[in-house]
């Protein structure tokens, strides 16, 4: 039996949805315990818990703002699409969503550096922009960045540039499995 919980989220004045260690949360329903963490997420460019290379950071931090390469295991059955959510749980105003890719092909198992997968859609970020917002913590602050891959039972019925809260809600409703890799950046 699935237990549905509600959790408020406060993301400054924009009131957007956030992410938590237990999955997608916000002003939407979440289901605890019913979605297995069965996807393994890795990168050929960095390791779990390690610093993310500066080329994937913002120009203000000396980076190039490139999208990082990721690899993941594919959930075996009942998957119609996949999604990727990149967020910073250490942002001053609450979790900051840097990137949302959705409707990634169900059989895909990687994203190449600097490449958006064909036919994938991108949602608005917390900054109300489409696309990858590279890590850019305030000088002297060390932040964590979570790369969470979701296996979805079917495609999200929204188009490129859809509002963040709508996309996160649709992802939450469709998630059948997930996996996460966490890295860090900043502290200089």
Image (cartoon, grey):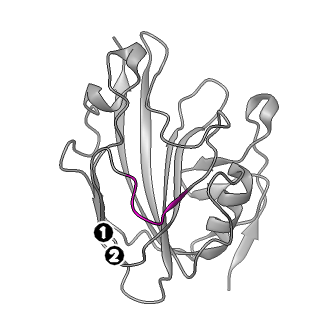
Number of the label disc, if any, that sits on residue 109: 1
Question: Which residue in the protein does label 2 denote?
Answer: 74
Q: Main secondary structure of the magenta part?
A: loop
Q: Residue furthest left?
A: 44
Residue 16, located in which quarter of the rendered image? Answer: top right
Give me the residue at 48% from left, 63% from top. Answer: 120
Q: Is residue 36 above or below residue 27?
A: below
Q: Measured from the top left, where is residue 178 in percent x and y?
A: 45, 67
- Nearer to us in this view, 180 or 7: 180
Give me the residue at 69% from left, 54% from top. Answer: 162
Span of residues in magenta = 116-121
Q: Quadrant of the C terminus?
A: top left
- Contact, mark 1 vs mark 2 (Cβ under 8 Å): yes
Q: Measured from the top left, where is residue 89 in percent x and y?
A: 54, 37
Q: Measured from the top left, where is residue 95 in percent x and y?
A: 60, 37
Number of the label disc, if any, that sits on residue 3: none
Q: Residue furthest bottom?
A: 77
Seen in the image, is 158 located left or right of residue 64? right
Q: Quadrant of the N terminus?
A: bottom right
């Amino acid at each position: 039996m699935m237990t549905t919980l509600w959790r408020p989220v406060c993301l400054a004045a924009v009131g957007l949805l956030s992410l938590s260690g237990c999955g997608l949360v916000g002003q939407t329903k979440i289901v605890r315990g019913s979605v297995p963490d069965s996807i393994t997420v890795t990168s050929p460019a960095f390791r779990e818990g390690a610093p993310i290379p500066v080329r994937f950071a913002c120009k203000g931090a000396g980076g190039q703002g490139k999208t990082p390469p990721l690899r993941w295991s594919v959930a075996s059955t009942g998957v119609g699409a996949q999604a990727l959510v990149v967020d910073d749980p250490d942002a001053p105003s609450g979790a900051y969503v840097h990137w949302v890719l959705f409707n990634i092909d169900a059989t895909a198992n990687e994203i190449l550096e600097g490449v958006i997968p064909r036919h994938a859609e991108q949602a608005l970020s917390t900054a109300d922009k489409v696309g990858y917002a590279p890590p850019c913590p305030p000088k002297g602050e060390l932040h964590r960045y979570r790369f969470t891959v979701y296996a979805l039972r079917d495609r999200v019925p929204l188009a490129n540039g859809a509002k963040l809260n709508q996309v996160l809600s649709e992802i939450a409703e469709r998630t059948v499995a997930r996996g996460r890799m966490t890295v860090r950046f900043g502290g200089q």
